[in-house]
Structures are given as C-alpha cells and as structure tokens.
Image: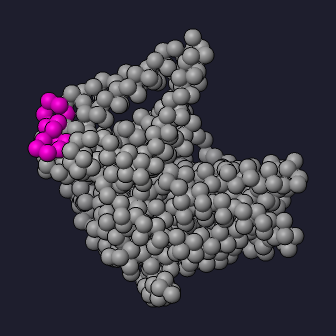
Amino acid sequence: MDFLTHLGMGFGIALTPFNLMMAVAGVLVGMLIGALPGVGPPSGVAMLLPLTFGMEPTSGIIMLAAMYAGTMYGGTITSVLINTPGESASVVTCLDGYQMALQGRAGPALGIAALGSFIAGTIGVVLLMLVSPLLARWALSFGPPESFALMLLGLTTVTLLGGDDPLKGYISMLLGLMLAMVGFDIISGEARYGFGIPEMMDGVDFLPVAIGLFGLGEVLAGAQEKGGPQVKGKLRLRDVLPSLSDWAMSKWSIARGTVLGFAVGMLPGAGPTVASFLSYTVEKKVSRTPERFGKGAIEGVAAPESANNAAATAAMVPMLTLGIPGSATTAIMLGGLMMWGLRPGPMLFEKNPQFVWGLIASQYIANFMLLIASTALIPLFVRALRIPYSILMPLIIVFCVTGAYSLKNNVWDVGQMLVFGVVGYFMKKLGYSPAALVLALVLGPLAERALRQSLIISDAGVGIFFTRPISAVLMVLALAAIAVPLAKWGRTLLSRS
Amino acid sequence: MRAADRIAAALLLVFAVAFAAGALEYYEYWGAGGPGPAFLPFWLGVVMSLLALMMLARALRNPDPGEAWLPRGEGLRHTLAVLGFTTAFIALLKVVGMILGTALFLAALVRYLGRHRWRVTLAVALAAAGFNWLVFVHWLRVPFPEAGIWIF
C-alpha cells in the first residue's frame, strides 16, 4: 500500500525527539488556552505562530496542529465546570455538561468528552489520511476558474454560517478582501493604497490583524466583565474516569458524532462549531428519552465533543489539499504555511510529502497525548482556571505584543495589531464576524490572482466560471449562499410594507 | 445598537465609495489583455457600497433602538484602562525596550485592575518579563527593541 509507506515515513518524522516534544507542548498549551475563557483556538494559534518561525515548517505545523486539537478539549473543561465555553465549539457542551457538574458528575462528563475526543480524533486522522490524497489528485486538474469558484464558496459559506447576521458577515468579509488589496499587485507589481508609506506598500499582514482581532479584541471585550465565575472544589484523577454504564450509554453517540463531525468539518466554512450543534440535535432526535437532554444527559456531552474533534481534524483536509481553510483557525495556519514558503494545495502532497505525512502522523500522537493529558492533568487545569482575570488579561496582551513584533521585528506591526484590537472590540460588540475578515484577508490575494487569470484566459468573459462543470457547480453553490440571506431580507421587506 | 449600525453603515458607505473611486483614479482598470490592478478593488468598493446602503436602510427603518452595548461605569473605566496602558506600552516600546516595558506594563495593569498586593504584582511582572527574555531573546534570538534610556 502506497500510503502505508508514506505513513511510516510520517511517523519517522513525527517521532523524532524534537517533533515529539513540539506535539506534547502543543497539546498542553492548547488545552490551557482552550480552558481560559476569552482565548479561543484562533487567538491561540495566532499568538503562537511567531514562536514557530525559527523552526522547520514540519515542526511548526506539528505544534500548531497539536495545539488546535488541545484547544478543542480545553474549551470543554470550562463548559462543564463553570458553564462558560472556552471556545465556540464547546458552547453546546454547556447544556448537559454543566448540568452534570451540578449533579456532582463533572468528572464523568469530562472523562467521556476526553474519550469521545480521542476516538473521534483517531478515526478522523484515518479518514484524513484516506480522503486527502484522493481529493488532492482530483484537485490537480483545477485551473484558475475552479480555484476562484472554490475560494468564493469557502468565503461565502464561512460568512453565512459564521454569525447571526449575514449582512454584517458579508460586510466583514468584504472588509477583509479590501484590506487584502493593499500592497503590491501580484500581476502588475504596482503598489496599491500605499499612501507612500513603505510599510503600507508591503501590504497588510494577516498575522498582526488576526492577533489584534482575536487576542487583543477579546481581552478588550472581556475587560468590562467582573472577575468571572470561579471553580469550586477539586477534581481527582479517579473522578474523571467514566463508568461502564456511562460508556454503554454514549458509545453510539460517540460513533454518530465522529461520522457527522468529519463530514461537516470537511465542508469549507462549516467547521467544529456547526458540527457540535448538529450532532447535539441529532442525538436529541434519535434518543428514546429526549426529555433528559438539557438536564445532564451524558450523550449530550459525548456526541458534540466527538463531533468537534472529528471536525477539527477534517478541517485539515480542504486546507492541505485545496488550500482553502474552513475556519478562522485553519486560515491562520494556512497563512503560516505560506510564510514558511509552502504553497498549500494539491501539489503539497507531491512536493512536500515529508511535511504532509509528518503532520498526519503527529495527529495520531497528539490524540494519544490528549487522552493522557486530559485525564491525568485535569486537576492542574482546574487550578489554572483560578488565575484571576486581572492577571490573565495583561499577560495575554503581552503575548499579543511580542507575537506581533516577532513576525518581522518591527513596531509597525505591533501598532497594526493595536488598531485591529480596537476594530475587533467593536466587531465583537456589534455583531460583525472577525473570522470572515481574517479568512478573506488570507484568501484575498489568491482569489484575485485566480479571478484575473481566469478573465485573461477567457478574454474577459464571465462565462468561463459557468461553462466548466466543476467550476459551475461550485459557483452555483457560492451564489446560493449569497442569495439565501438576500431572499430572506427581501421577504421581510415586502411583508413589512 | 441601532445608532451604532447607522453610524457604521454611513462610515462604510463613504469608505467604500472612496475605495472604488480611488482605484479608478490611480490605477489601471483594464490593462493589455486582461483586468488591471484597479479591477477587483473597484468592484469590491461597489459591492461594499451596496451592502452599506442595505444596512443603512435596515437601520433607518428599524423601530427598535436595541440594547445599549457600550459599557458604563467601572466596565468602561476598565476597558479604557486596558486600552490606554496597552497603547502607552506600544508607543514606548522603542524608548524603554521590550523586556523592561513588559515588566512595567504588567506591574501597572495588574495592580490597577486587580488591586493585587505588590508582592503578587511584581512576581507576575518579573516572571513574565523573564519568560519573554528566555524564549524570545535567548532562544529564538528575536532582536527586541532595547531600552533607549537606562533608568537603572
């Protein structure tokens, strides 16, 4: 088998002492970041990205991917213990997880979440391994029109699924695309919107923007809250192990969550949050005792936690094979890949097999580490939750500043981070979507190139996007994502007048 | 929220029109054989103007003033303090340097927000500054801005 040799090579890379250390560090830091309220996966990955600049790209992505897996679990800890999701994919876990905690069953809730995450993550990696090369081979036939249509689909679905208000979502996306226009034009080499400032002519880097929007913006938005709820009591290791009956009740929920999570996670734009909500709904539907949901049903924890982990793994598929990130976190990772000089997309599998397979193998290791860490180290994380917000917030800001600075060692980027921190504050308060902005900023230059190349090929005809079959299907889906909120808006407008 | 939507929509509209007009004014819309550097920016500006108009229309027709979203009282003071201290930290980076700046920033903000005892405050400040030095300066060799003035 072809991929067994590849996987063997991958493990050879992932098991080198340094890479193993990076995977372990990634999982632990990720869990900690996920557990801290107000710091989600995108801010964590954005703040840690600068740390990886000195490393080999393979070690860097291993650490980031391990961290992503860690944050998925870390968010669960706060959901269960203090009813405050550490990140959006764990919101639905609060419903039954916190109820379980109130009934004194916080331990089994966290335990089943860990077990479900482990199973889902492991199966997810197997699926990732099987699906990605196939998709990559298929995507090799893509020309500029298909690339553009795919990027448009990614952008519109993220925007549509990202928030409550599609109009504000699309405005956020457009802002990101407009920011992406700043700097040298890739085709003519002309500097756009530079205003004669050399730093502006270089363009707007996504990293200071992402750190500002997600890191500093979150801190500013949280600054008005008082102290926040505190964890009481202790959790010991043996409290965390779920009993046999817990397992019997949730094994099929874990299985359903895994399959559903992976399928949803692969779609551009859907990601872990949508997956967790969907799987909770499904569990409630198939359950013979739906009235227990919301009152501490263990299936209500097991299914969404499995789904969000499977989805986080699946989100790597479009990122690696098509170069289209499905979420804000993978968008930041994609930006990282480009900074390391790698070109994500179907060629990645042929040109940098050691990178791809090292990453896949390290995902197995990360999942295993996650299981150990999430059971053995839970008491430690519970203690970390007791750090008061007044100490935590300033520390996060310091991390934002050093992260933004070390990108290119200049203070301009730090200033940019500060500006986008304020922008992020308002976006969060007023219901805009920072995720759509960052995604558009990362994809903007690629989308522009694909669009202009397509129009050059077609001699200025827009028909090229609709006459090629793959591109036509993708375009229709993307346009549907734009049309749905428009139609709804039109209907309310008509009914009111 | 409604007032904020109206203001935001108006600002976005002005920005989008300027963006599109600027593109046509300064860059080439159609070059030899294909779309030029102004092509996409122009259309982005047009689409953004339409979205801004939609939001403006919606916010103007909206009878519900919405919830107040700006913090008041202590919440506002804390938000402004965090923003102010951070701005000062960044503005003074080139003067006091990253490591000393980190320590001073943390000491000031932790003390202000939490009213922690000086012992706790200084421990946090020094530990974080030390960590920064160890990881970024010693290990990753990032050339941090160094103190332009030495107080010690």
For the point 23% across and 50% down, the residue is A457
Q: Is residue A318 above or below residue A490?
A: below
Q: Does the image show residue A131? A: yes
User: What residue is rendered at 46% in x and 18% in y?
Assistant: B57
Determine the residue positioned at 73% across, 49% down.
Answer: A281
The reply to whether residue B111 is visible in this rendering is no
Q: Is residue B13 magenta?
A: no
Q: Is residue B33 magenta?
A: yes
Percent coordinates x, y for residue A483 in the rendering: 49, 34
**Residue farthest along the left direction in this orientation:** B32
> In the drawing, does residue B18 fall left or right of residue B56?
left
In the rendered image, which quarter is residue B46 located in? top left
| Closer to the camera in the image, A465 or A70 | A465
Position of B11 with respect to B119 (left or right) is left
Splitting the image into 4 quarters, where does residue A311 fall?
Answer: bottom right
Q: Which of A158/A39 is in front?
A: A158
Residue B98 versus residue B45 in the image, above or below? below
**The one of A52 and B61 positioned closer to us in this rendering:** B61
User: Where residue B59 appears, x then y in whole percent?
Assistant: 49, 19
